[in-house]
Image: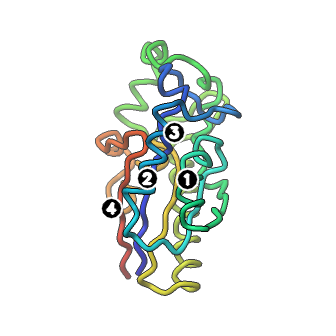
Amino acid sequence: MTTLILLRHGRSSANAAGVLAGRTPGVELDETGRAQAARVVERLARVPLAAVVSSPALRCEQTVAPLLADRGLTAVTEPGLAEVDYGSWTGRELKKLTEEPLWRVVQVHPSAAVFPDGEGLAGMQARAVAAVRHHDARIAAEHGNRAVWLVCSHGDVIKSILADALASHLDNFQRIVVDPCSISVVHYTE
């Protein structure tokens, strides 16, 4: 089947400030993030890409922009790959969130974590994996089973997709590290 490249967006202004951006509109890449995005073109220069699918977040759009320009491709925007809806946690400093009782649940038993006025991590994983599987089937049908395609999304979303691909329970996803602008590769088989 196909090969999926999972690209986390480059460093954003929120990452640099230690703030949980979530779905806050207008969060952009900072200078480091823009440089990381430019280097993605070099890192993937020899990889034939059939398609690019992106979270609707501006920071993801900015991360794939240099690659799209270099390849003459257009990204498909996929709401199912959007950042977690952190609800009332959105915009708060991470160091303050570590004091919340829910923080421990997120770290130890994420499948049970539901953010106040937001969504649960299990629900996020279900929507993200469904989106990936939908696009994987579409791309395989359009470009063949050997197609290589790229998703640009967010740390927790990518970690949940990787946990699924590894047949690992969501409660283990905190063991997976996905740094800004890092690349993870999944080769789907029958």
Alpha-carbon neighbours of circle 1 within 10 Å: few (<14), some, or many (≥20)? some
Disc 1 to disc 4: CB gap under 8 Å: no
Residue 27 is left or right of residue 166, and the answer is: right
Residue 28 tag number: none
Residue on which the image places disc 1:
66
Cα separation between marks 1 and 3: 9 Å
Q: Amino acid at mark 4?
A: Ala
Cα separation between marks 2 and 3: 10 Å
Label 4: which secondary element? loop
Please report whichever mark, 1 or 2, sits nearer to the chain's N-terminal start.
2
Q: In the image, which is nearer the foreground, mark 1 or mark 4?
A: 1
Q: Is residue 182 above or below residue 99?
A: below
At x 37%, y 53%, the residue is 183
Disc 1 to disc 2: CB gap under 8 Å: yes
Label 3: which secondary element? helix
Please report whichever mark, 1 or 4, sits nearer to the chain's N-terminal start.
1
Please report whichever mark, 4 or 2, sits nearer to the chain's N-terminal start.
2
Total marks in image: 4
Q: Quadrant of residue 167?
A: bottom left
For the N terminus, the image quarter is bottom left
Residue on which the image places disc 2:
40
Residue 167 tag number: 4
At x 59%, y 41%, the residue is 59
Please report whichever mark, 2 or 3, sits nearer to the chain's N-terminal start.
3
Residue on which the image places disc 3:
34
Q: Is residue 65 above or below residue 98?
A: below
